[in-house]
Amino acid sequence: MPTTRTNRQTIVSLILLLQLALALPAAAQKKKTEEAEVNGTPVLWREPVDIETRNLLLGAGGKEMKPDLSSVTFVEVQTGGHSTKYRVRDGAGKEWVAKVSNEAQSETAANRLVWAVGYETEITYLVPHLRIEGKGEFDNVRLEARPRDVKRSGEWQWENNPFKGTPQLQGLKIMMLLINNWDMKDSNNEVLVPRENREGEARYIISDLGGTLGKTGGAISRSRNKPSDFVKADFIERVKGDRIEFHYKGKSKKLFDDITVADARWLSRWLGRMSDNQIKDAFRAANYRPEEVEELSQAVRARIDALAKVSGQLTARP
């Protein structure tokens, strides 16, 4: 009996040590994110007063941030996530993360649609064919900027952030539904802060939008970057009272339980101001085939119209 009791105590001690070891990284990450919030002014969204003229071919970085493709050299493998990623340096010495996978197209287009309505985003460009010295040649490579003056300060949580209860956060959730982002996890979110100015802005972004433009669902049935799935997927199921129920089967489904008609009305004000050509440009920027550009842009427009309808707004097509 004493031996049995001693063994049990040893096992309990080992379990407690394991739990502590697992908890420490999470606690450290949470602390990093909290420090970013305290040291900077939190920013999730800015009013897109120029929405009608926003260039969705170039996205948030515009012409000024475009990579110099005269030479692109391999720096190191970037770990984490579903896709193969390489840290690279362009001809001007700027560093980028090159994503080489089927997520490159969907992420580029989704990034531009989210940016178009005012949300902070990564700076990304899609290169149809790219030679990375030291690695080889690849088709449809997404380049994501890593400016030297920007620090990546940690992840932010969907259910614990400075924007809880605001139309801006609710609108971002709806945008995730509009592009069928089934990969709704905190580790895809990032806080960006200036390296030198600790009192500057802390920009809250969704860094990984690759799990989009397919269909949501279980681990086997979901898809990413599959236009045929996206255009056939349902969007809004019904309105119950002041709540909107969406057709969503991806991760963290409960995040969407509190979306109201008023939330949809707020976002519709901005979505309705995008032209059909701007929406097409988001997909052209991601190097989709012409027929896919048409199908995807029509599907997005149909979702914008459906959202406007349930929110009681007239649809507008600039």
Image (tube, grey):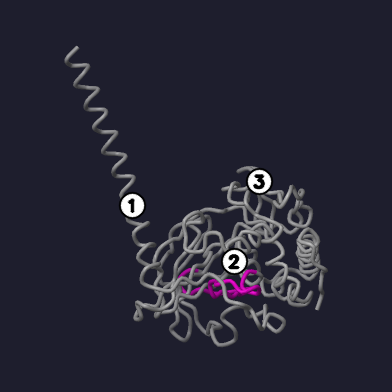
User: Which residue is under mark 3?
Assistant: 249
Front in this rendered view, residue 137 or 179: 179
Identify which amino acid the numbered label 1 is placed on.
Pro
Q: Which quarter of the rendered picture does the C terminus lie within?
A: bottom right
In terms of secondary structure, where does tag 3 sit?
loop
Cβ–Cβ below 8 Å for labels 1 and 2? no
The amino acid pointed to by label 2 is Gln
The vertical placement of 223 against 306, above or below, is: above
Magenta run includes residue 123: yes
- Give the magenta-colored segment's residue range: 114-135
Image quadrant occupied by the N terminus: top left
Q: Which one is closest to the eye, mark 3 or mark 2?
A: 2
According to the image, label 1 marks what residue?
Answer: 25
Q: Position of residue 310 (x, y in %)?
A: 78, 58
**Residue at 35% in and 62% down:** 32
Q: Is residue 164 magenta?
A: no
Q: In what element is the residue under mark 2?
A: helix
Residue appearing at x 56%, y 53% in the figure: 184
